[in-house]
Image: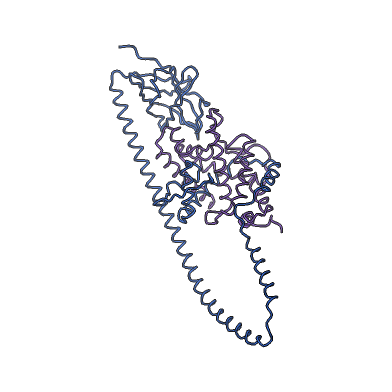
Chain colours: A purple, B blue
C-alpha cells in the first residue's frame, strides 16, 4: 500500500494501530512546519530538534486520542507541537532564570531571504497574511499574542511583565484571537 | 496535551473564557490540564475551540520556514521501535478482513444435509424480505433525522456566532469603561500633584536638536510616585511604542509604555520600585512590542534626575 496517497485522518488511525509507515508519512508532511515553529520559538537548534522529535513520538504514542470533532488533523498536530514547545520553554525558564535580551527580541514573521521552495513560498505568503491581520489589531492586543503564542508566557506572566491586571490581559487575549480569526476568515473570503 | 497526568476536573459551567488562552498556549499548567479534561466531555466547548485553533494554526504557519534536519527521521524511527502506541485498535479494513476470514472458515465447517436445503432457503428468503422492509423504513427515518440534524446544526452555528459577537462587543464596552475610569483617576492624580507645592517638576529634553518633542515629569517629594506628560510627540512607527526607562550606573528598569494621541499628547503614571530620586536618568525610547531587559531602540527624550533642594 502506498501510504503517501492516504488522507491525514486515515494516517492517524493507522499510526494508532502501530503502522510505522503511516507515522513516517505524517512526519514527511509536517516535520518542516513543526521544526520551523520549534526553531523559531526555542531559537537553539539542538533543543528545537529534540522538541520536534518529542512531538512526533507523542503522536506515535497518543494517535488513538485523536478525535475528529476537536478539529482537522493539521490543527490538532500543530496544537500538540505548540503545547510541547511551550512546555520546553517553561521548563527551561524554571531551570534557569532567563536574562538574555535576545529571548524577547521582536518577532520577525517575514520570511528569510533564501530562495524558497514551493512549500516555503506558500508559507511565506501565509506569513505575510498573518502579519497583515496582526497589524490591524491594537498594539496592546498584538503584544499579548506575540508574548503568549511565540514567547510562551502565560497570561499571569504577561500581566506581571506589563504591569497590567490579569483580567485586562485575559480580555485582550480573547479580543485579539477573535479579531485575528475574523480577519483571517475575511481574507479567505476575499 | 501539556501533561500526561490528567485531573478529573469538571466546571460547573462552560469555561469559555479559557478557550482563547488555551489556543494561544497561555494558560497556566493546572488550568490547561483542567480544561483538557473538560474538553474530552464537552462538545460545545470543543466546537468553539476548533475555530480558535484554526486562527492559532495560522500563527504557527507564519514563522520563517526551515526544513527539519534529515537525521531527525532516523532518530525518530529508532525511538518508535522501542515504544508501541498506547492504544492499538485494528483499522476498519483489517477488522473487516478478519471478520470475513472467520466467517469463511466457519462456513466450511458447517455442512447442511440435503433435506434441510428447501427449509433453509425458505427461511432465508423470508428473513431477507422482512429485513429489506425494515431497512427501507429505517433508511427513510434516518434520512429525515439527518436532514433535521443538519438544519439544527446550521441554526446552532448561527446562534453561536451571534453569541460570540455580542460577547465580544460587551467585552469591548467593558474595556472602554475601564479605560475611561483609569483615565479619570489619572487626571485627578495629576491635578492633585500639580496643586502640591512640594511637587518637583523635571523637564525631559529631546536628544535630537531638531525635534519639538518635550516631556514634563512631576515627582512627589518622596519620589515614590510621578506623572509623565508628553507633548508634540510624533507617532511611533508601526508596531512600535514609546517605552519609559529609569537608569542608574548602567542598570535599566523598564517602567512601561506610554501611548500618544494624534495631537502628539501622552501621559502616564509612574510607580517606581523605589524612590525615583535613587535613579540618575529617565529616558524615553522607541521599542518593539516585546520589551527586553534593556533598550534597543532610538532614544527620544531624557533628563537627569535631580533631588529636590532640602526644605
Q: Which residue lies at the image location 50% right of the left edge and 46% below the top edge?
A: B23
Q: Is residue B183 visible?
A: yes
Which residue is rendered at x = 47% and y = 65% of the image? B149
> At which x and y percent is residue A49?
64, 39
Q: Quadrant of residue B162?
A: bottom left
Please determine whether, in this image, residue A57 is positioned above or below residue A144.
Answer: below
Q: Quadrant of the C terminus of chain B?
A: top left
For residue B175, what is the image quadrant? top left
In the drawing, does residue B265 fall left or right of residue B88? left
Q: Is residue A112 above or below residue B46?
A: above
Residue B86 coordinates in the image, percent (x, y): 60, 52
Place of residue B88 in the rendered image (x, y in percent of width and height, measured from the top left): 62, 56
Q: Nearer the viewer, residue B17 or B75?
A: B75
Q: Is residue B287 left or right of residue B204?
A: right
Q: Relative to the observer, which residue lies in front, A13 or B205?
A: A13
- Residue B116 lies, in percent from the top left, at 65, 86
Front residue (pair A180, A44): A44
- Asked whether residue A136 appears in the rendered view, the answer is no
Amino acid at each position: 500500500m502506498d501510504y503517501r496517497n492516504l488522507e491525514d485522518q486515515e494516517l492517524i488511525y493507522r499510526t494508532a494501530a502501530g503502522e510505522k509507515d503511516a507515522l513516517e508519512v505524517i512526519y514527511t508532511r509536517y516535520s518542516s512546519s513543526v521544526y520551523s515553529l520549534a526553531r523559531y520559538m526555542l531559537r537553539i537548534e539542538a533543543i528545537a530538534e529534540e522538541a520536534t522529535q518529542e512531538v512526533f513520538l507523542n503522536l506515535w504514542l497518543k494517535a488513538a486520542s485523536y478525535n475528529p470533532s476537536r478539529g482537522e488533523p493539521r490543527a490538532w498536530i500543530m496544537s500538540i507541537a505548540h503545547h510541547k514547545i511551550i512546555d520546553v520553554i517553561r521548563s527551561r525558564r524554571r531551570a534557569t532564570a532567563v536574562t538574555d535580551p535576545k529571548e524577547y527580541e521582536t518577532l520577525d514573521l517575514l520570511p528569510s531571504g533564501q530562495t524558497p521552495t514551493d512549500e516555503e513560498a506558500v508559507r511565506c505568503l501565509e506569513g505575510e497574511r498573518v502579519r497583515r491581520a496582526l497589524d490591524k489589531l491594537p498594539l496592546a492586543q498584538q503584544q499579548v499574542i506575540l508574548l503568549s503564542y511565540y514567547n510562551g508566557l502565560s497570561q499571569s506572566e504577561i500581566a506581571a511583565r506589563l504591569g497590567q491586571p490579569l483580567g485586562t490581559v485575559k480580555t485582550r487575549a480573547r479580543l485579539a484571537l477573535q479579531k485575528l480569526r475574523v480577519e483571517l476568515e475575511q481574507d479567505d473570503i476575499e | 496535551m501539556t501533561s500526561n497526568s490528567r485531573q478529573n476536573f469538571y466546571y460547573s459551567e462552560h469555561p469559555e473564557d479559557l478557550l482563547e488562552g488555551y489556543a494561544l498556549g497561555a494558560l497556566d499548567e493546572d488550568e490547561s490540564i483542567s480544561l483538557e479534561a473538560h474538553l474530552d466531555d464537552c462538545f460545545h466547548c470543543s466546537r468553539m475551540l476548533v475555530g480558535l485553533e484554526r486562527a492559532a494554526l495560522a500563527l504557527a504557519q507564519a514563522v520563517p520556514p526551515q526544513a527539519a534536519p534529515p537525521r531527525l527521521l532516523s532518530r525518530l524511527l529508532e525511538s518508535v521501535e522501542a515504544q508501541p502506541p498506547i492504544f492499538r485498535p485494528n483499522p476498519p479494513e483489517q477488522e473487516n478482513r478478519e471478520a470475513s476470514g472467520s466467517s469463511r472458515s466457519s462456513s466450511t465447517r458447517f455442512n447442511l444435509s440435503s433435506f434441510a436445503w428447501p427449509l433453509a432457503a425458505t427461511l432465508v428468503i423470508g428473513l431477507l424480505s422482512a429485513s429489506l422492509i425494515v431497512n427501507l423504513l429505517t433508511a427513510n427515518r434516518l434520512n429525515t433525522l439527518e436532514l433535521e440534524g443538519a438544519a439544527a446544526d446550521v441554526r446552532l452555528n448561527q446562534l453561536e456566532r451571534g453569541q460570540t459577537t455580542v460577547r465580544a462587543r460587551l467585552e469591548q464596552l467593558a474595556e472602554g469603561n475601564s479605560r475611561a475610569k483609569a483615565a479619570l483617576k489619572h487626571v485627578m492624580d495629576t491635578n492633585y500633584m500639580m496643586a502640591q507645592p512640594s511637587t518637583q517638576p523635571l523637564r525631559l529634553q529631546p536628544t535630537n536638536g531638531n525635534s519639538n518633542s518635550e516631556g514634563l515629569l512631576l515627582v512627589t517629594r518622596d519620589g515614590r510616585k510621578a506623572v509623565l506628560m508628553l507633548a508634540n510627540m510624533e507617532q511611533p512607527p508601526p508596531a512600535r511604542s514609546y517605552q519609559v526607562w529609569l537608569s542608574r550606573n548602567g542598570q535599566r528598569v523598564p517602567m512601561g509604555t506610554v501611548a500618544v494621541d494624534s495631537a502628539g499628547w501622552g501621559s502616564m503614571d509612574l510607580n517606581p520600585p523605589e524612590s525615583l530620586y535613587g535613579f540618575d536618568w529617565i529616558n524615553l525610547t522607541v521599542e518593539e512590542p516585546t520589551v527586553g531587559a534593556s533598550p534597543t531602540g532610538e532614544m527620544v527624550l531624557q533628563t537627569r534626575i535631580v533631588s529636590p533642594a532640602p526644605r
